[in-house]
Amino acid sequence: MRLWHQSLIPYLDNKRLCAQHRECCALRGKGWGRKHATVDYVFKYDVGHLFQYHLMVMCEMNNRGYYVSVSWYDRLYRGKNLSSAQLSEVGTYLYKRQDKQLIYPEHDDRYLKECLLNLKSKGAELVNGKTIEEMLIKLDLNENV
């Protein structure tokens, strides 16, 4: 269970992108608030943050020709078996966020590197012309500046 760094979403292979969608659906649904070491930071914020992240995943899926149920584009939707979230649970985050701003502050360069190394250890390859190695080199160069 992991939310990949948001800058990796356009470069995830199809298998991982679809898995990320399922992860977001689970977290927005019955998984909301359930402890899990890797994603506990998500619950420090209102569900609007998770919706914004999920929206990035769904948009990338649409770009690749995948169909995503329109229900998930409703920020209050929590799945077929749960009632909708209350507007107060979603918060005002959606209206404050700048385009390039990190959705989760935890998704910093250190976390990006952790995600890249995790993908590399699994033998994953990125899509859209990026490689894990060149992204790691770019991160290392930024750290040394």
Image: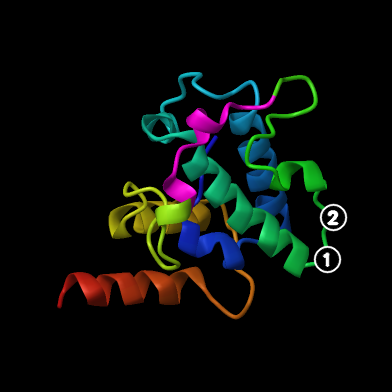
Task: Specify the amino acid type for callout 1.
Answer: Gly
Q: Which residues are magenta?
A: 84-94
Please name the residue that numbered disc 2 is placed on. Answer: 67
Instruction: Find the residue positioned furthest to the bottom.
Output: 129
Instruction: Find the residue positioned furthest to the left.
Output: 145
Q: Is residue 127 above or below residue 129?
A: above
- One can see residue 5 in this view: no
Query: Measured from the top left, where is residue 11 in percent x and y?
Result: 59, 67
Q: Is residue 145 above or below residue 109?
A: below
Task: Specify the amino acid type for callout 2.
Answer: Tyr
Number of callouts: 2
- Quarter of the image for residue 19 reads top right
Most foreground residue, 83 or 21: 83
Q: Is residue 98 above or below residue 88?
A: below
Please tell me whether mark 2 sits on a helix, a strand or a loop: loop
Please name the residue that numbered disc 1 is placed on. Answer: 65
